[in-house]
Image (cartoon, rainbow, N blue to C red):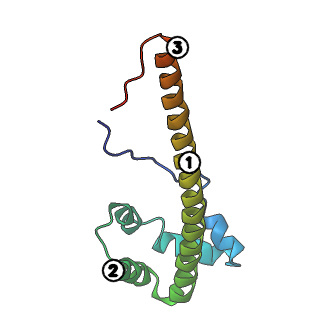
Amino acid sequence: MVKNIILDVGKVLVAWEPEDAMKKLGFDDKTVKVVADATVNTPVWLETDRGVWSDEQILQAFYEKAPEYKKEIKEKIELLNEEQDHIDSKRESRVSMIIAVFGFVSIIAAALQILDYLSSGRGVMIG
């Protein structure tokens, strides 16, 4: 039985271009490089996937890499949180749709099994 499915999402299933997102925030090229090197281009960023560090620990580690860019790092993290909220709401609606479709398919499959059983000439068992 399958218990877990792990998907590599960033730069695989979705476009993950953090530097482009920072440019959209209005960061100049130098700021993009410094903030990226203090956040998404660090081993700390990889640790975020493991879920063992608190948000505060992660932010502190980022701030320590580039304390003079604390404001920009915070803006980047807020943007990522907004993107994640948007993705989560889309995923929830997709999951609801998938559940509804699977439910509908299950009902149709059950109805087809009943029709097949009835057309086989065997009696209906009620009990």
Which of these two is toward me, 84 or 116? 116
Question: Above or below — where is 69 with respect to 36?
Answer: below
Label located before the other in sequence (1 or 2): 2
- Observer-side mark, 1 or 2, equals 1
Q: How many residues crowd mark 3 within 10 Å: few (<14), some (14–19), many (20+)?
A: few
Mark 1, Cα crowd under 10 Å, few <14 / some 14-19 / many 20+, is few
Residue furthest to the top: 121
The residue wearing badge 1 is 100
| Contact? badges 3 and 2 (CB < 8 Å) | no
Relative to residue 12, is residue 49 drawn left or right?
A: left
Q: Amino acid at mark 3?
A: Ser
Tags 3 and 1 touching, CB below 8 Å: no
Label drawn at residue 119? 3
Identify the residue position indicated by label 2 in the image: 57
Residue 41: x percent and y percent? Answer: 47, 64
Residue 8 in sight from this viewpoint: yes
> Which amino acid type is marked by label 1?
Ala
36 or 77, nearer to the observer: 77
Q: Residue at x 54, y 67 (%)?
A: 84
Q: Residues within 10 Å of mark 2 (few under 14, many from 20)?
A: few
Q: Nearest to the eye among marks 3 and 2: give it.
A: 3
First in sequence, mark 3 or 2: give its number: 2
The residue type indicated by label 2 comes to Gln
For the C terminus, give its image quadrant. Answer: top left
Residue 116's tag is none
Q: CA distance from mark 3 to mark 1?
A: 28 Å
